[in-house]
Image (tube, rainbow, N blue to C red):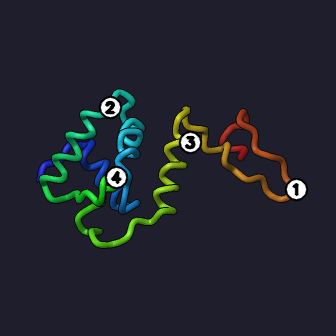
Amino acid sequence: MLLTNDQRFLLDILREVRYMRLDQILPLMRLRDPAKAKSHCEAILRYLRYAGELVPVGDDLVCLAEFRGQEADPEMLCALDILLSLAVGPPLPCRAFLVPPPGGPAPSAHQPEAAL
């Protein structure tokens, strides 16, 4: 089956999280392309549903067909909400997440990579 990059992106995410609320899809797609419109996401969902890849669950959830019948993980849905809420600004440099060794100096954002 031929899929667009956006369709593959959504399927890859669903393979990881298994279930997703419909209100999470547009913000997720906007992480890749901020100009993404709601109508575009609806078209992606419609195509994947007709292709048998996606299954609506109730009024507000979707999952991959292979996970049909399994329960949605509320913690994973919450984790996806947190990811989307934190992804609003520009990404932080990786060194901002380094934990200093016990008793050592904290890494500085203006230190060269080799010094870390």
Comparing 62 with 2, the one in front is 62
Q: Earlier in the sequence, mark 3 or mark 1?
A: 3
Give the quarter of the image for residue 108: top right
Spatial separation of the CA atoms under disc 2 and disc 1:
47 Å
Q: Earlier in the sequence, mark 4 or mark 1?
A: 4
Which residue, given by chain and number where applicable, does mark 4 sit on? 60
Which residue, given by chain and number where applicable, does mark 1 sit on? 103
Other-residue count near label 3 (Cα within 10 Å), few / some / many at <14 / 14–19 / ≥20: few
Q: Depth-wise, is mark 4 or mark 1 nearer the camera?
A: 4
Residue displayed at 25% across by 35% down: 40
Give the quarter of the image for residue 16: bottom left
Residue displayed at 18% across by 46% down: 46
User: Circle 4 sits in a helix, a strand or a loop, which is it?
Assistant: loop
Please name the amino acid that badge 3 sits on. Leu
Which residue, given by chain and number where applicable, does mark 3 sit on? 86
Spatial separation of the CA atoms under disc 4 and disc 1:
49 Å
Q: Earlier in the sequence, mark 2 or mark 1?
A: 2
Spatial separation of the CA atoms under disc 2 and disc 4:
20 Å
